[in-house]
Amino acid sequence: MGNINLNSETIAMYSKQLRTPSFNRYEDVIRQLDNDKSYEQFLIELLKLESLSRMESSQKRKINAAKFPYLKTIDEMDLSRYDHVSEATFHELASCDFVSKRQNIVMIGNTGRGKTHFSIALGIKACMQGMNVKFYTAANLSNELIEAMEYKRLLKLERQLAKTDLLIIDEASYITFNRHQSELLFKVIADRAEKRSVIVSTNLKFSEWTTLFENETMVVALIDRLTFRSHVLNMNGVSFRSEHSKENDSSN
């Protein structure tokens, strides 16, 4: 019994030193293997376990680093309720091939149509595939850029954003950006053109984007960069939230 405990402690010690914590679960692997399996097969199964453990840890770190406001999945969406976007398109985008192809997504639709939900769901899918993702509201991103400029950290932040595989800019419609904010946002998006992917969601059709930015020429250039190699989704329709509220009121 003493040798067994000593062996377990020794394995635990080496697992910690080598940073292979799943090796502590070697007894689970032994129980699952048939008696006729070789030592090589045991080692393969143990390495598989460690690889899976590391992948799951990496996915969790990437999801946490993305700073999603909450977690949502595509399975939670009723894709049949969109009149202008096919279910096949939603599923195609969920493969995240658009990120590897350096394409963008622009979601246009009234409030309560699941734009933020779908943005988050796509972001989580990308994280699960090992990609680096950042989620911002347009207001938060513009404020962070201005703050970084004031504290001489702008170049560092811009480099971080440039390395992000998928940048999600949500709610680009609720505030008007001043000249400095407009220029900084424009640069972030322009620097990503044909290099990295962006998802933008907004309540405004393109012709109304002049209400967001002071410089009309910049708006035209911004739209041009966003829509090149892009998927533009018309997600307008009846608000799911208001519909849900009415259902709750009628049931009371």
Image (spheres, grey):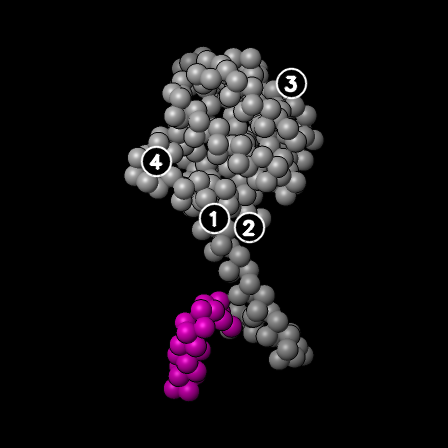
**Residue at point 41% right, 42% down?**
155
Q: Is residue 163 magenta?
A: no
Q: Position of residue 220 (x, y in %)?
A: 56, 19
Q: Is residue 4 magenta?
A: yes
Can residue 72 be seen at all in this image of the molecule?
Answer: no
Determine whether label 3 and label 1 are within 8 Å by CB. no
* Amino acid marked by disc 1: Lys
Is 140 placed left or right of 63 in the picture? Answer: left
Secondary structure of residue under mark 2 = loop
Mark 1 → mark 4, Cα distance in angstroms: 26 Å
Residue 149 circle label = 4
Secondary structure of residue under mark 1 = helix
> Can you identify the residue that label 1 sits on?
62
N-terminal label among 1 and 2:
1
| Labels 1, 4: front one | 4
* Amino acid marked by disc 4: Met
Mark 2 → mark 4, Cα distance in angstroms: 30 Å
> Can you identify the residue that label 2 sits on?
130
Give residue 66's quadrant in the image. top left
Mark 4 → mark 3, Cα distance in angstroms: 43 Å
Q: Position of residue 143 (x, y in %)?
A: 35, 30
N-terminal label among 1 and 4:
1
